Image (cartoon, rainbow, N blue to C red):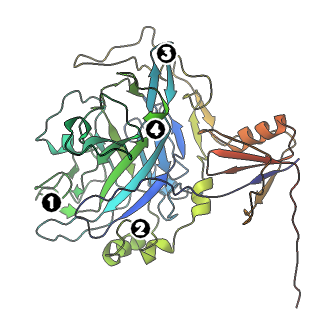
Amino acid sequence: MVFSKLFAFVTASLLVAPPSVSAYWIFGGTRPVVTTRLDPIVDPGEVSSHVHSVVGGSRFSPNYDYDDLITSQCSTITVQADKSNYWAPQLYYWNQTDDTYTPIPTSFNIYYLPRPGPKNETIQAFPTGLRMVAGSPLRRTNNDSNFADQAISYQCLDYNTDHTGDPDWEQRADFFDHQCPDAMRAQITFPPCWDGVNLDSADHSSHMAYPIQAYNTGDCPDSHPVHLVSIFYEMFVSVDQFPYVPGSWIYSFGDNIGLGLHGDFQDGWTNKTLLQDALDNCPDANGSVQACPPLNAAVNDDIASACHAELDIVDESVGLSSPPLAALPGCNPLWVGNGTKPTCDPTPPTPGMINSTLPLPSGWTAMGCVAEGTTGRALASASTTNPAMTPPLCANFCDNLGYPYSGVEYGDECYCVSTIMCSLFEHSN
């Protein structure tokens, strides 16, 4: 029996352009490369306190090094010169009837926004190896006048009803008190002003600053004079796939209010000249990578869609496969209100690590890629989907149904077939 991998890329995702931006691009509909309890910025070299959903370079690991990251085999970002990692906490659905937790399907839009202020400062590419954090899992209050707080927000999506003027549907700092019929968008704006010296800092944020005029645009302060391209995450969370119950949306660190949303970024661009070229010479991109020639030349959708983590991850279930979890991984009991975060009794043991690249089942062999035809799928006998889809999982699914060929597509879909028909021709001079 053999295994054939089908490579494709999902581009279906709502791409909402921020206002007043003349040149920007979006790495849209980006799926996680891994979901695991690691955070190499905040908890280097050890198991993190809570689960994160990570997109980008395949060599995400607890022991972070820029030189290692850029050797990633692939990235879930379409532009393969960007091996950076972008991550945020996983959102779970808490079933209050049976006290279980199920991860809510998540994808990312990563915006690159060149936003000079009134001084029209030059927008620069990231310094090699930059890392930073926006937001904090410890945040329990909101200050509307604080730029760092303004940089964390939510939008409730409803494509069929106009909620203009309804304050209950306006963008807000915490979770909504009603269902979002077409998913919820969790939003993170990173500070774009760099001190020009430090690639990181003790709190992973003080080497960066928000502009003077606003959290998302303006001139950089004298203390942080280097104006970098702004990064903005849209994390699309499919809360609509679960019945709405107040308090049922809960982050992996126990927060069911939403103020603790945070994001991490580790630079992994392998070609800074390419990034700077895109910043300088793509005034008409208007969100589209394809409309920026330097970036478009580096796009490989097939590689992006097939990319999976290649190094060790935490040896524990994060709930992507059945059954639901009886507790959030780590010590993360439900945390509501403004009080001290509760502790676990007893404290769960710290798991070890396991290689994320699992072997194919016995008897299966990787054949390579199969291109889809114009009249139907190449593998069309049976199919299944799973956000944790891997080649071994797909092979086992097809094997149990008696099919000798299987293939993964879009990173989360599996297809089976009994026979692959093909013809091979060679022309010799």
Residue assigned mark 3: 348
Q: Nearer the viewer, residue 284 or 81?
A: 284
Numbered circle sitting on residue 238: 4
Disc 1 and disc 4: Cα gap in Å? 36 Å
Which residue appears at 48% of the width and 14% of the height? Answer: 99
Structural crowding at the residue carrying mark 3, measured as other residues with C-alpha within 10 Å and reported as few (<14), some (14–19) or many (≥20)? few
View extreme (bottom): residue: 429
Q: Nearer the viewer, residue 178 or 28?
A: 178
Structural crowding at the residue carrying mark 2, measured as other residues with C-alpha within 10 Å and reported as few (<14), some (14–19) or many (≥20)? some
Cβ–Cβ under 8 Å for marks 3 and 1:
no
Q: Amino acid at mark 1?
A: Cys
Disc 1 and disc 2: Cα gap in Å? 27 Å
As displayed, is residue 388 above or below residue 195? above
Which of label 2 and label 3 is nearer to you? 2
Residue assigned mark 2: 288
Going from the N terminus, do you reach mark 3 or mark 4 first? 4
Which of label 1 and label 2 is nearer to you? 2
